[in-house]
Amino acid sequence: MSVPPGPQPEHFPAPWASDWGEDPCGLWQGLTYIGVRPEFRWIPPGRFLMGSPKDEYARDDDELVHEVILSRGFGLPRPPAPRPCGRR
């Protein structure tokens, strides 16, 4: 797995970050507050397709495939249960 393409954040690490790094999934930052430490993954700006193909099993009618454009990157909170990068 490689680091997602696209611009890096303007300020890394952010002033609030208690720890940070880069791994095969990309850049991440942690924030420790009163013993709780969520982690945030950098999602760069870019384009991607969202939705489900018409022939996908259990697809709903409102899941049309459409292009999404992110004009700015953002930090996405990482799920609490650890999983390999890009896997569900």
Image (cartoon, grey):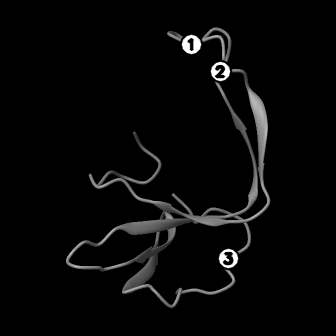
Crowd class of label 2 (few under 14; some 14 to 19; many from 20; radius 10 Å): few
Q: Is residue 69 left or right of residue 76?
A: right
> At which x and y percent is residue 7?
73, 72
Residue found at x 51% / y 57%: 1
Q: Which numbered disc flags the more N-terminal residue, 3 or 2?
A: 3
How many marks the image carries: the answer is 3
Residue found at x 37% / y 78%: 31
- Give the CA separation, mark 3 to mark 1: 35 Å
Q: Quadrant of residue 46?
A: bottom right
> At which x and y percent is residue 22?
47, 76
- Give the CA separation, mark 1 to mark 2: 7 Å
- Tell me which amino acid carries mark 3: Gln
- Give the CA separation, mark 3 to mark 2: 31 Å
* Tags 1 and 2 touching, CB below 8 Å: yes
Q: Which residue is mark 2?
A: 63
Q: Which numbered disc flags the more N-terminal residue, 3 or 1?
A: 3
* Tags 3 and 1 touching, CB below 8 Å: no
Give the answer, above or below, for where 5 lies relative to 83: below
- Tell me which amino acid carries mark 1: Arg
Residue 59: mark: 1
Residue 86: mark: none
Q: Which residue is mark 3?
A: 8
Residue found at x 63% / y 87%: 11
> At which x and y percent is residue 57?
52, 10
